[in-house]
Image (cartoon, rainbow, N blue to C red):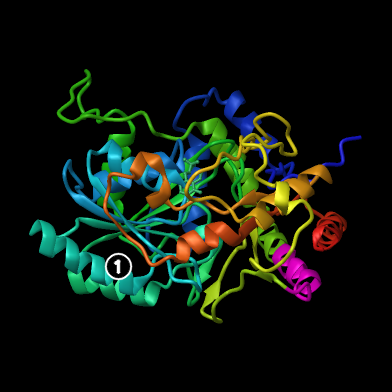
Amino acid sequence: MDNRILLRMCKMSGYEMPFIQEAFEGEWVVPLGPNVAGFEKDLEKFLASDKKVVALSSGTAALHLGLLGLGIEAGDEVMVQSMTFSASVNPVRYVGAIPVMIDSEPYSWNMDPDMLDMAIADRIRLTGKRPKAIIIVCLYGMPADYTRLLEVAQKWDIPVLEDAAEAFGSSYAGQKCGTFGRYGVLSFNGNKMITTSGGGALVCPDDVAAKETMYYATQARLGYAYYQHKDIGYNYRMSNISAGIGRGQMMVAEEYIAHHRHRQAYYREHLGNAAGISLHENPSSIYDSNFWLCTVLIDESLRIRGEENAYASAITSTVGGAGGVTGQGTSIHTDCEPNANVEAMRLGLAQLGIESRPLWKPMHKQPVFSDFPSYVNGVSEDLFHRGLCLPSGPYVTDKDADRVIDAIKSLII
Ligand SMILES: Cc1ncc(COP(=O)(O)O)c(C=O)c1O
């Protein structure tokens, strides 16, 4: 029997099939229909704000349309959190804009407000132009420091596009992530808090913005009987089948979020006393992370079995074998990589059938973005050097977590 413990698997609740069945019976196997409309209503209710939600084919598509909604054009500068997944930044390039990478603060691990403030002043000094947007990310579900970041955004009068792809169900000061910026992005990819197999949504400020988003998401077709176009459009609408999965998942969303929070608390309770290991925590009671992925930091001083050989070979194994379950099969020497003890922990866990993964590698250290400006303070690189994501999600039971905890302890010398 396969007793591997994987990083994060989506889980079907059993409530999805009736919605899909209904779609088939009604011949709604298209990128619109009752499930799309129903899922959008469910999301609006869940977000508990007066924002309008447009369901799309992915979170990346939502980021792209959010940038279009903000009027971002080729050559504009967009301030974006460096510590994130590449999908937060790629759409900036889709529209030909210039990403300016901003480092994190050490509490939430998200964009550092002081660094942002300083960087905006510097961009204006250097280019004579104000950056056109700020992309804030809630990494691993942890809300960013919205109070201070929104103050900075307001001070410079720059709109915020909030990448809450990982933060479905997280809140800050009682308000749901995804509703803080002018636009917000949600993802329902297969590894996210809830899934539509692949999908996303743009949280829009009002009906007008939602209508415009739908227009661009459906090939920018004008309202004629024939096909008339004055803009470049995209095929980004969510399918009615995917939305049916989403409606079923919404019925267990709160349960899944509670499970993720419990998982992090459980790891904290049982690993917290392993000297040299620290669990990420809400920086204060204002923050309420969904703990989409449970993350630990491993002190440089902690000795892990096999760390002297952790980078002996450029090609290393993972739980999933070649390529890994999540495509994490190789660790190649670069100027920025996880510490040897972290890599040894990852490899040791993999040998024990447990998948783990380094934290997101900062975008300013990615070759693809190396030519773009960045403002760094060392925080994101330090987190990347010391951090590891542990198995999380609805399939990871307390018994699995015990196995992970015992494995981690057994690998510490
Ligand atoms: C921070 C972040 N932003 C954006 C995305 C993109 O979402 P999607 O995979 O739905 O395109 C993801 C996840 O994949 C993400 O983790």
Picture layout, residue 364 above or below residue 24? below
Q: Which image quarter: residue 293?
A: bottom right
Query: Nearest the camera: 226 or 336?
Result: 336
Q: Magenta stretch: dominant SS?
A: helix
Q: Which image quarter: residue 198?
A: top right
Picture layout, residue 80 above or below residue 269? above
Query: Nearest the camera: 119 or 143?
Result: 119
The N terminus: image quadrant = top right
Query: Nearest the camera: 284 or 406?
Result: 406
Residue occupying the far right of the picture: 1
Residue 263 colored magenta?
Answer: yes
The C terminus: image quadrant = bottom right
- The kind of residue tagged 1 is Leu
Residue 285 colored magenta?
Answer: no
Element at badge 1? Answer: helix
Q: In the image, which residues are magenta?
A: 262-275
Residue occupying the point 38% across, 69% down: 112
Q: Which image quarter: residue 184?
A: bottom left
User: Horizontal and vertical percent for residue 188?
Assistant: 54, 44
What residue did someone put label 1 on? Answer: 116
